[in-house]
Image: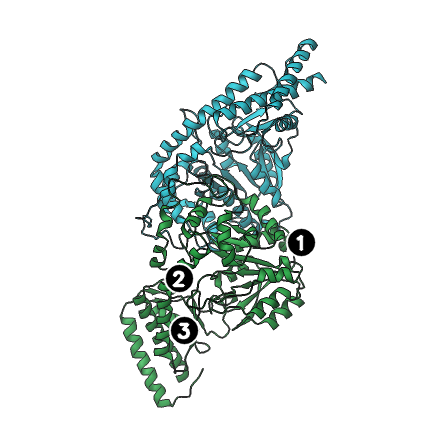
Chain colours: A green, B cyan
């Protein structure tokens, strides 16, 4: 990433960066690029949800009164809509609460406190539990591991998914390795989609732990940003074909499809895993909010309805991702100070700055009123050993705010990058 | 409960009971008195919810967009409505998902896996954990204990609440006793409301465990069946006054106020406990369904709105409870075969039959097409040592169905009771 500069030109570049930063800091900005939150305009696309199901209807397709208790699996007609999107047959898919993160948390809890299919004992009774963490990754996955005292083993991401040589070796050798976090499509934060070979190897690899699980967080399954939607291979089917039917827990939700806080989450898996989760869930709840599920059925209608809705989402998001790419290229292209991803879907752009600069860039940006996700958040324990990765979340701000924030961020990258070179 | 009968009159009574049972069995009934589910007419009272919040509004009182992520505490305006009902100041009350059972489950999970305020270690790391179970009690409380390997110690219920001499002794002596389940108002199943003295003693008693907790499941706080609503003392305040501020977890929900499957659940406690729960919840979720909370605010409006709504619920429920009492009195009064409760609120009537008869009554009723909660469900481990307690849930069937079912049940009680006497 480095380009040789003469001392004179470096001095000039640093001087200009300092002036630009001074201007920036003087502007009194207050902008936020931290989280992958939908913008209000995106939420407006689902305005109809707010009046549904309406007075006339309160039964599901099978005649269940959705207002009452019961129905631990969720409405079958909603599961049918999302079977295709999530690559899970409707009969192996559950529609539950408003958050897939909750389902991931609860699967960990149930595995810790109840014996998961294939396990010899509860995870909490085992000496040590470890999860592989493809890195960079999603900070909330890492926070769950940290909370439950699960060791995190970073594995580098490649353009095809996690480094499968490393994954295969670690999973085959160490029976304490009970799981791996995967965001297989348009991954958080670097937008990578897993290749067919990666999926095949995940399904068929040897595991030392009989209760090894892939936490397949398919959060961006329908969240395309181009005319060529990425397809990934069907891991659930591949696992069954490879004789490892119980290996995968599939997660998904409508959080970034309809209402971020009031959507529906999904869990898909093998019959044995479903039975295990349902038995545990039955102790915890008398059923999910089925009115909200009916609301979603009436609003989305079918898989085509989801696709059409996601096209409308894309129309709002794509210009923001284009603005990010355009400003990064215009301000940092050719400087040797940065590389960035060009995602085909999902919610994030990863910006890589020179080693040792990410924290300082985030600090300078915050001082100038631009809040970014903390540097390191993309890594287990918040520790990015190279201190080089910054996650950009373009969805929430307006296009004008985003452009201001991105321009400001590039000023900070130039300032910190040239300062480092000048030392 | 026994009345002496001459052999002749017993023969006649038994003969009549046998004939009545034969008639009953021949009727091909299919009736269900198992669960405390609201009837469709009760759910109709909240029909307005199905079209709310409507297209025009999606912000909470503080301007938060309820459609988006965030807001782990729930809407303050909803917490204000229920502060009064649940005797918890709004700032110490959280509004969360659709089920208080989930919150009880999760509090157990968090105490097992994260150190609860006052604890020396995680509960899962302790040799033994026990909960006191006032008996008869709620089967789903007991199921949670059983699932997590928490020992259950039955404590007899009295007309004032649990036998406080027993509670005080067990809690003071045994540091493994970490909790007690309480349904303090119109308790499940016997309709008892705790006396002020019981509440005062719960608040001030000595506990051997520094992390002892009262799970205060105030499920029927607003669920009156008479003109004289029962008031119970404020345990949260009493605990604080007694220097045991962290002792109580208060639970409640709108499940039996609005929609059973699509309501809002509440958790109230001390600032230290709230902080603990919120920190754990923050790892699990990016916030509850705030649209549903706004919906409830718009529908219920204020505490008076809740009261008026519960009067409409009472108008539907009271005739059912009256029918139960009327039929029990007409068919079993003076037989010496049964005693029953006359609850002033809540969802259940407890029927006590002669020792050793409850399972057989439930079996005979099922054979005649009348499904009851399994005998023993009201006791820890499903084991009613006297085999005498039957829980009746009158809410769900129509009045006509309920009358049929109750008549049939009394036939079964006479049959099984007189058969026992004749042996």
Distance from label 3 to label 2 (Cα)?
A: 37 Å
- Mark 3: give few (<14), some (14-19) or many (20+) Cα within 10 Å: some
- The image's mark for residue A311 is 2
Q: Chain of mark 1?
A: A
- Mark 2: give few (<14), some (14-19) or many (20+) Cα within 10 Å: some
Residue at image point 58% right, 70% down: A197
Q: In this rendering, would B31 be left or right of B76?
A: right
Let me know if residue B248 appears in the view: no
First of labels 1, 2 by sequence position: 1
* Mark 1 lies on residue: A121
Is A45 situated above or below B44?
Answer: below
Q: Are marks 1 and 2 in contact (CB under 8 Å)?
A: no
Q: Position of residue A221 (x, y in %)?
A: 48, 61
Distance from label 1 to label 2 (Cα)?
A: 46 Å
Q: Are marks 3 and 1 in contact (CB under 8 Å)?
A: no
Q: Nearer the viewer, mark 1 or mark 2?
A: 2
Is A366 situated above or below B256?
Answer: below
- The image's mark for residue A360 is 3
Q: Nearer the viewer, residue A102 or A342?
A: A342
Distance from label 3 to label 1 (Cα)?
A: 45 Å
Q: Quadrant of the N terminus of chain B?
A: top right
Q: Position of residue B43 (x, y in %)?
A: 43, 35
First of labels 3, 1 by sequence position: 1
> Could you say whether the residue bearing mark 2 is in a helix, strand or loop?
helix
Residue at image point 39% right, 34% down: B45
Q: Are the residues flagged by discs 3 and 1 from a single subunit?
A: yes
Q: Position of residue A106 (x, y in %)?
A: 54, 52
């Amino acid at each position: 990433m480095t380009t040789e500069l003469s001392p004179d030109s470096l001095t000039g570049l640093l001087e200009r960066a300092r002036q630009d930063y001074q201007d920036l800091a003087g502007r009194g900005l207050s902008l936020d690029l931290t989280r992958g939150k939908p913008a209000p305009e995106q939420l407006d696309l689902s305005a109809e949800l707010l009046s549904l199901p309406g007075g006339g209807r309160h039964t599901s397709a099978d005649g269940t009164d959705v207002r009452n208790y019961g129905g631990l699996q969720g409405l079958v007609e909603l599961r049918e809509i999302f079977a295709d999107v999530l690559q899970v047959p409707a009969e192996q898919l559950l529609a539950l609460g408003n958050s897939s993160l909750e389902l991931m948390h609860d699967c960990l809890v149930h595995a810790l406190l109840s014996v998961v299919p294939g396990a010899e004992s509860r995870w909490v009774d085992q000496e040590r539990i470890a999860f592989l963490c493809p890195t960079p990754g999603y900070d909330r996955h890492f926070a769950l591991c940290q909370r439950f005292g699960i060791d995190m083993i970073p594995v580098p991401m490649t353009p095809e998914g996690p480094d499968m040589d490393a994954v295969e070796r670690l999973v085959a050798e160490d029976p304490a390795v009970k799981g791996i976090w995967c965001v297989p499509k348009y991954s958080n934060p670097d937008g990578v989609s897993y290749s067919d070979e990666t999926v095949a190897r995940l399904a068929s690899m040897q595991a030392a732990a009989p209760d090894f699980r892939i936490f397949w967080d398919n959060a961006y399954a329908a969240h395309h940003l181009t005319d060529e939607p990425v397809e990934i291979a069907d891991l659930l089917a591949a696992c069954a074909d490879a004789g490892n039917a119980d290996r995968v827990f599939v997660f998904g939700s409508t959080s970034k499809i309809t209402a971020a806080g009031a959507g529906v989450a999904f869990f898909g898996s093998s019959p044995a895993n479903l039975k295990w989760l349902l038995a545990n869930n039955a102790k915890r709840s008398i059923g999910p909010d089925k009115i909200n599920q009916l609301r979603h059925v009436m609003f989305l209608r079918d898989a085509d309805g989801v696709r059409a809705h996601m096209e409308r989402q894309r129309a709002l998001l794509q210009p923001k991702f284009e603005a990010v790419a355009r400003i990064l290229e215009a301000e940092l292209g050719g400087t040797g100070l940065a590389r960035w991803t060009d995602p085909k879907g999902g919610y994030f752009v990863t910006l890589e700055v020179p080693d040792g600069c990410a924290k300082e860039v985030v600090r300078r940006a915050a001082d100038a009123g631009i809040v970014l996700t903390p540097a390191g958040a993309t890594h287990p324990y918040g520790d990015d050993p190279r201190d080089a990765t910054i996650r950009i979340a373009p969805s929430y701000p307006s296009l004008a705010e985003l452009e201001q924030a991105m321009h400001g961020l590039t000023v900070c990258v130039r300032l910190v990058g040239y300062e480092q070179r000048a030392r």
